[in-house]
Amino acid sequence: MPEQLKRSSELIAAEIRAELAKQEKTIPDLSEAIGIPVTTARRSVKGQRAMTIDEIADTASYLGVPVTELLRRAVAA
């Protein structure tokens, strides 16, 4: 994974982890909601795998946060 993509994935993942914790939701809940395997969701939320744009959008929707807000928070971190 190119370094810039890795850093972006880590920042987005950190924001998703924070929002999941805030809402007391789990990675298995997220994986079921967005239709990906738990192992894939876990790697994504740890920043070890870049999420697709669709996965980010579906995650934001599941969390009830506009995707633009999720990305803004990640960039501001």
Image (cartoon, grey):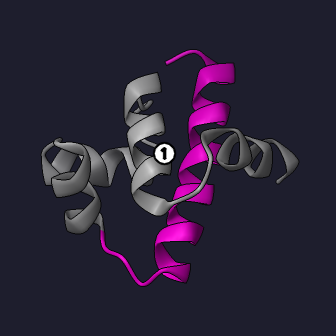
Q: Position of residue 32 (x, y in %)?
A: 16, 55
Q: Residue at x 51, y 65 (%)?
A: 17
Q: Nearer the viewer, residue 3 or 14?
A: 14
The magenta segment:
1-26
User: For this view, does 65 lie left or right of residue 25?
Assistant: right
Amino acid bearing label 1: Gly
Classed neighbour count for the residue bearing mark 1: other residues with Cα under 10 Å, few (<14), some (14–19), many (≥20): many
Determine the main secondary structure of the stretch shown in magenta: helix
Residue 39 included in the magenta stretch of the image? no
Residue 9 included in the magenta stretch of the image? yes
Q: Position of residue 21 (x, y in %)?
A: 49, 79
Against 57, residue 32 (above or below) is below
Q: Residue furthest right?
A: 76
Q: Residue at x 17, y 41 (%)?
A: 36
How many marks do you count on the picture?
1
Q: Secondary structure at mark 1?
A: loop
Quadrant in the picture for the C terminus? bottom right
Q: Position of residue 24 (x, y in %)?
A: 42, 84
The residue singled out by tag 1 in the image is: 47
Against 49, residue 30 (above or below) is below
Q: Nearer the viewer, residue 50 or 73?
A: 73
Q: Quadrant of residue 19?
A: bottom right
Q: Position of residue 58 (x, y in %)?
A: 38, 41
Q: Residue furthest top?
A: 2
User: For this view, does 32 lie left or right of residue 20?
Assistant: left
Q: Nearer the viewer, residue 15 or 67?
A: 67
Q: Residue at x 44, y 30 (%)?
A: 50
User: For this view, does 24 lie left or right of residue 15?
Assistant: left
Against 3, residue 12 (above or below) is below
Q: Residue at x 48, y 80 (%)?
A: 23
